[in-house]
Image (spheres, rainbow, N blue to C red):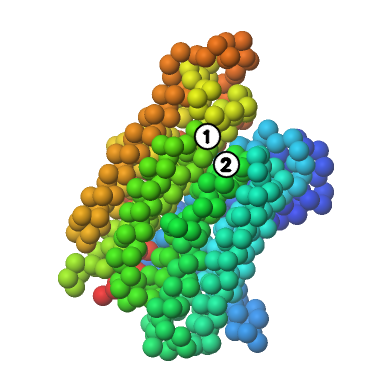
């Protein structure tokens, strides 16, 4: 099942590259592949037995590269099963958000599907070498998607993304080789304590704090955490809509997933020792990102900086593993994991809506907009719904994730958590400000005779899918939290008690 879920998009990309040529056929074939992969991701998530817990859907070929002790090892727990569902959902949304692509359609949809395989692989791989291969595979399609189909300084942004991520990957490669030569295994499940006793830091050839720091740098670049965040606004601003959806929705989550799966699970003591650093960096992200947003005049750049702010909650939730006294509660880490899912759907939706506005107005410059709701009621309604979810309105998934994170973190870092809550207030301010200036008020003279139209039937698919997900989780959070809690509690009980 996992092999099919991971490699179906890659197989679809090969079919497109080798056999299809008509743009209409390519679009519908890519949509069919994305729909089937989304169904497979639902099966993986829904078929995860919460009562049993642990690793499920396991596929293992121990003799894959026997000379290097490399295995083909896939599996999911409660954490990764949820992220597989997120990737399937956003992959489908990305395909339908790309319907207007006219340039080099064959290559575009092929690279988009390759990207989905890479991200699926990261969330399911349980061998370090396989994990690293999927991690690096993601760079290739992302570079081409931004550099060829982007706007503005697209080549600069693509290279900047590549340089930052490859630099982080170099640190990760050194760290995973140290772990292998110290323990003789690439088995992430054993090292993380999912199936074995976990990594014994005293065995490492280098100090555990240094190895932890190398992994941390790689994942902090991807999350991203300040001051390693500067590639993100440029990449978002110049990337095509669907690539921004995947970038914000799942690529950033690779950083958060790595911090939980590797840093926290394999180095629990170092993670606890670094908890104050994590909390401070999380608060800096939340407040810095929120304050910089107020200076933005480009809608995509505004949402990009808001992503930096929201991902600070992941670091803040991770810092709760310090615990209170002898007790370590899984609530903060559950909130961090839930924030990764909800941020993916919410910010993905916002980027979809910005893309729809841009395709009709050919501008993202906020002062040039205004009063668009009268011309585009569906786009305006869904845009408002996404913004309200992002600012944490009750009944939306954003509220559940933020509240869970803050509840789990407050007993550990009271003052810092209170500062983080200020970021939620700032979020409400800049999002309402964005809506008021771009969608409401009088329609500027320049748009009176401009043929502004609402979303077409195909363009409504991605917004509808993501909006349903946002309100479904907001109204029935147990759909996700019960599965996430199984994965998170296993980590806490195995490594922090």
Relative image position of residue 233 (x, y in whole percent) = 53, 46
Relative image position of residue 449 (x, y in whole percent) = 61, 10
Q: CA distance from mark 2 to mark 1?
A: 8 Å
Q: Residues within 10 Å of mark 2 (few under 14, many from 20)?
A: many
Tell me, yes or no, whether the two marked residues, 2 and 1, touch with CB atoms within 8 Å: yes
Q: In the rendered picture of this protein, how many numbered marks are placed on residues?
A: 2
Residue 213 occupies quadrant: bottom left
Relative image position of residue 196 (x, y in whole percent) = 41, 81
Please tell me whether mark 2 sits on a helix, a strand or a loop.
helix
Residue 109 occupies quadrant: top right
- The residue that appears at 42% across and 42% down in the rendered structure is 292
Mark earlier in primary sequence (2, 1): 2
- The residue that appears at 68% across and 49% down in the rendered structure is 155
Q: In the rendered view, would you say 82 is above or below 269?
A: above
Please tell me whether mark 1 sits on a helix, a strand or a loop.
loop
Residue corresponding to mark 1 = 298
Q: In the rendered image, which quarter contains the N terminus? A: bottom right
Q: Is 209 on the left or on the right of 395, as rendered? A: right
Relative image position of residue 352 (x, y in whole percent) = 54, 36
Q: In the rendered image, which quarter contains the C terminus? A: bottom left
Q: Residues within 10 Å of mark 1 (few under 14, many from 20)?
A: some
- The residue that appears at 37% across and 29% down in the rendered structure is 432
In the rendered image, is residue 56 in sight? no
Q: Is 276 on the left or on the right of 13, as rendered? A: left
- The residue that appears at 54% across and 72% down in the rendered structure is 171
Q: Residue furthest front?
A: 295
Foreground pick, 266 / 229: 229
Q: Is 451 on the left or on the right of 437, as rendered? A: right
Tag shown at residue 183: none
Q: In the rendered view, would you say 68 is above or below 232?
A: below
In the rendered image, is residue 276 in sight? yes
Residue corresponding to mark 2 = 237
């Amino acid at each position: 099942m996992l092999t099919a879920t991971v490699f179906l998009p890659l197989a679809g990309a090969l079919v497109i590259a080798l056999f299809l040529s008509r743009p209409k056929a390519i679009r519908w074939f890519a949509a069919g592949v994305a729909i089937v992969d989304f169904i497979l991701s639902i099966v993986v998530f829904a078929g995860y037995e919460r009562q049993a817990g642990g690793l499920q859907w396991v596929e293992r070929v121990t003799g894959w590269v026997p000379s290097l002790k490399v295995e083909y090892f896939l599996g999911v727990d409660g954490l990764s099963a949820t992220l597989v569902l997120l990737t399937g959902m956003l992959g489908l949304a990305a395909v339908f958000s790309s319907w207007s692509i006219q340039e080099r359609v064959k290559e575009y949809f092929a690279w988009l599907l390759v990207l989905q395989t890479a991200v699926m692989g990261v969330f399911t791989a349980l061998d370090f070498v396989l994990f690293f291969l999927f991690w690096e595979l993601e760079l290739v399609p992302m570079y081409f998607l931004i550099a060829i189909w982007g706007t503005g300084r697209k080549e600069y942004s693509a290279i900047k993304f590549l340089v930052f991520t490859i630099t982080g990957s170099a640190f990760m490669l050194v760290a995973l080789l140290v772990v292998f030569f110290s323990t003789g295994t690439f088995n992430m499940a054993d090292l993380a304590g999912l199936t074995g006793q976990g990594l014994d830091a005293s065995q490492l050839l280098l100090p555990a704090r240094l190895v932890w720091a190398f992994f941390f740098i790689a994942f902090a670049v991807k999350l991203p955490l300040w001051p390693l965040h500067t590639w993100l606004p440029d990449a978002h601003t110049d990337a095509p809509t669907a690539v921004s959806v995947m970038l914000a929705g799942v690529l950033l989550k690779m950083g958060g997933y790595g911090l939980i799966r590797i840093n926290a699970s394999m180095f629990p003591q170092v993670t606890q020792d670094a908890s104050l650093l994590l909390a401070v960096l999380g608060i800096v992200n939340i407040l810095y990102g929120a304050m910089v947003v107020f200076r933005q005049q480009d809608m995509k750049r505004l949402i990009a900086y808001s992503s930096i702010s929201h991902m600070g909650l992941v670091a803040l939730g991770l810092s709760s593993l310090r615990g209170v006294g002898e007790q370590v509660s899984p609530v903060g880490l559950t909130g961090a994991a839930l924030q990764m899912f909800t941020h993916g759907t919410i910010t993905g939706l916002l980027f979809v809506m910005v893309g729809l506005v841009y395709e009709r107005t050919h501008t993202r410059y906020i002062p040039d907009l205004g009063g668009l709701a009268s011309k585009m009621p569906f786009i305006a309604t869904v845009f408002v719904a996404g913004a309200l979810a992002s600012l944490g309105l009750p009944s939306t998934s954003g509220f559940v994730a933020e509240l869970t994170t803050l509840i789990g973190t407050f007993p550990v870092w009271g003052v810092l958590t209170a500062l983080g809550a200020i970021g939620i207030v700032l979020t409400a301010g800049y999002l309402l400000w964005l809506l008021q200036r771009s969608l409401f008020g009088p329609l500027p003279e320049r748009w009176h005779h401009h043929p502004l139209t609402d979303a077409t039937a195909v363009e409504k698919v991605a917004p509808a899918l993501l909006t349903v997900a946002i309100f479904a989780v907001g109204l029935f959070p147990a759909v996700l939290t019960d599965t996430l809690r199984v994965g998170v509690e296993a980590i806490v009980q195995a490594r922090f008690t």
